[in-house]
Amino acid sequence: MLMSPVEFFRNLPKKECPECGQYVEEQAESYLMECERCLSKKVE
Ligand SMILES: [Zn+2]
């Protein structure tokens, strides 16, 4: 039986920042793994 899209997305693991372990809100730039705080630290 196919999962409904809602069930599918609910079962996806939340994105977690590998730097600080904080959950990252889904963003348009989904390739970004770090949270905004850690990303800003990396900006040179
Ligand atoms: Zn972080």
Image (cartoon, rainbow, N blue to C red):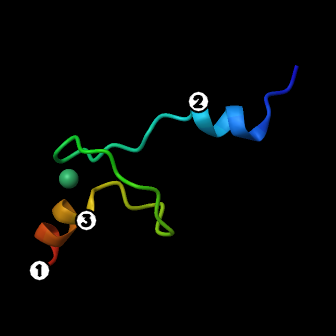
Query: Tag 1: residue type?
Result: Glu
Numbered circle sitting on residue 11: 2
What is the spatial separation of the Cα atoms under label 1 and label 2, in whole angstroms? 36 Å
Q: Is label 2 in contact with label 3 (beta carbons under 8 Å)?
A: no
Check disc 3 and report its element: helix, strand or loop. Answer: helix
Q: Please identify, in this view, whether the residue under mark 1 or under mark 2 is nearer the observer.
A: 2
In the rendered view, does 22 fall on the left or right side of 7?
Answer: left
Numbered circle sitting on residue 36: 3
Dot 2 or dot 3: first in sequence order is: 2
Disc 3 crowd rating (10 Å Cα; few below 14, some 14-19, many 20+) is few
Query: Tag 2: residue type?
Result: Asn
Direction right: furthest residue = 1
Q: Is residue 16 above or below residue 37?
A: above
What is the spatial separation of the Cα atoms under label 3 and label 1, in whole angstroms? 14 Å
Give the percent coordinates (x, y) of residue 33. Answer: 35, 54
Check disc 1 and report its element: helix, strand or loop. Answer: loop
Disc 1 crowd rating (10 Å Cα; few below 14, some 14-19, many 20+) is few
Disc 2 crowd rating (10 Å Cα; few below 14, some 14-19, many 20+) is few
Quadrant into which the N terminus falls? top right
Numbered circle sitting on residue 44: 1
Task: Decide if ligand 1 comes within 8 Å of the CB at mark 1.
Answer: no
Task: Decide if ligand 1 comes within 8 Å of the CB at mark 3.
Answer: yes
